[in-house]
Image (cartoon, helix red, strand yellow):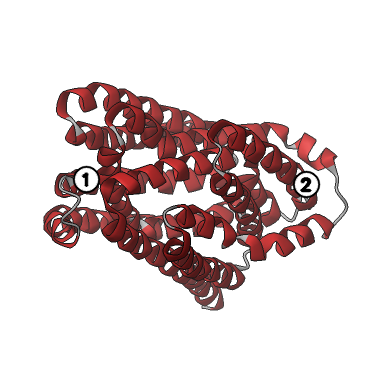
Amino acid sequence: MDKISNKLKDLTSISVADVSSKGISAFFWFYVASIIGPEIYGEIAYFLSIAAFASTVALFGSANTLIVYTAKNIKIQSALYALTLVSGSITSIVVFFIFYNIGTSFLILGYVIFGLVTSELLGRKLYRTYSKLVITQKILMVILTIGLYYSIGNEGIITGMALSYTPYIADTIKGIRKSKIEFSLVKERFNFLINSYLQTLSGALSGSLDKLVIAPLFGFALLGNYSLGLQFLTLLLIIPQTVGKYTIPQYSSGNENRKLRKIIVLFSIVLAVTGFVIGPSAMSWIFPKFVEVDEVIRIVSLSIIPTTIVLIYESKFLGMEKAKNIFIMSVIWVGTQILGIIVLGTAYGINGITASLVLGASSSAIYVVIVDELDKRKNRELTK
């Protein structure tokens, strides 16, 4: 009973953090959308995608590596912190000289710092501390961003986001000083780090490349409608993503909860139906400037089920140190989605672009299910 109670407390802590932080973030971006309109919203989404992808490049797979090996009590933190901070600084400078947007460069560093700190907390299973930190950052983001928006205009949005991560610089410094920097620990696990890096990089591409492709091909206004639909999807995926964060260190420790996986898939079906039926009319009523968002909402709701399946198996593969499977899954997602954006987007506009997201998620879901089943069969044959 004590073990069950502790697991429920841990899951509750992560759930509170993710539901609260992503809920705050989603409604914040809904508010921003209502005051700036689709074109500026699309432009901001474009630069946020640049920052998100660049920070993933800079993190070099450290986030998932920290979660997995910290859970195994291997003191790899200091070396990863040091390497990643150097990488993040270089990346932010390069991005500045390409786009000349100082807010985006600082945001890259913010993403990197926060990614390191939160990953270590998850690996150490300090779920309550993680919860407090994540919620605090989101509150700071809302206060600073809205304040700077009304002070200096649109530039204040990204700048405010970047500044919301500055309180966690101290945690990063502590992470470096926590133990002796031993690069040999990283070298010994270089294969996992590379596979994890390729997985997160391809995952970042699936989360950012669509916006980076849509903006130059179809314009910021269309991207604004598409991004608002994705924000609605983010809101619906809060619970599935929360469960995924909880299960990575559990798998690393040898614990598997099949009942939880079944429950979350059933829950995703309910979410998909709800989003498909109610979402379009609600969003078009709240955001009349976004004239194409209703169809986007209807289509993206269909992606909830395959995305949830992908999240479940991603956690399992990471916990079992099978990052290569996740990399292939992400490549399938990105390749299918980008091809769909170019082909279907040209033919059917925003509906085709949004449908490509569903196709990418579905292709990845099919792949992970097949791979997991093949692994199970192989294991059963070995035990005979």
Q: Is residue 320 above or below residue 232?
A: above
> Residue 85 vs residue 213: left or right?
right
Residue 302: assigned label: 1
Residue marked by disc 2: 82
Q: Secondary structure at mark 1?
A: loop
Q: Position of residue 184 (x, y in %)?
A: 84, 38
Which residue is located at x 47 percent, y 59 percent? 152
Q: Secondary structure at mark 2?
A: helix
- Mark with earlier residue (1, 2): 2
Nearer to the camera, 253 or 208: 208
Which residue is located at x 47 percent, y 68 percent? 147
Nearer to the camera, 84 or 211: 211
Residue type, mark 1 in image: Leu
Which residue is located at x 57 percent, y 50 percent? 107
In the image as oriented, which residue stretches furthest toward the right? 180
Q: Position of residue 272 (x, y in %)?
A: 21, 53
Q: Position of residue 144 (x, y in %)?
A: 51, 66
> Residue 95 vs residue 286: left or right?
right
- Local packing at callout 1 (Cα closer than 10 Å; few below 14, some 14-19, many 20+) is many
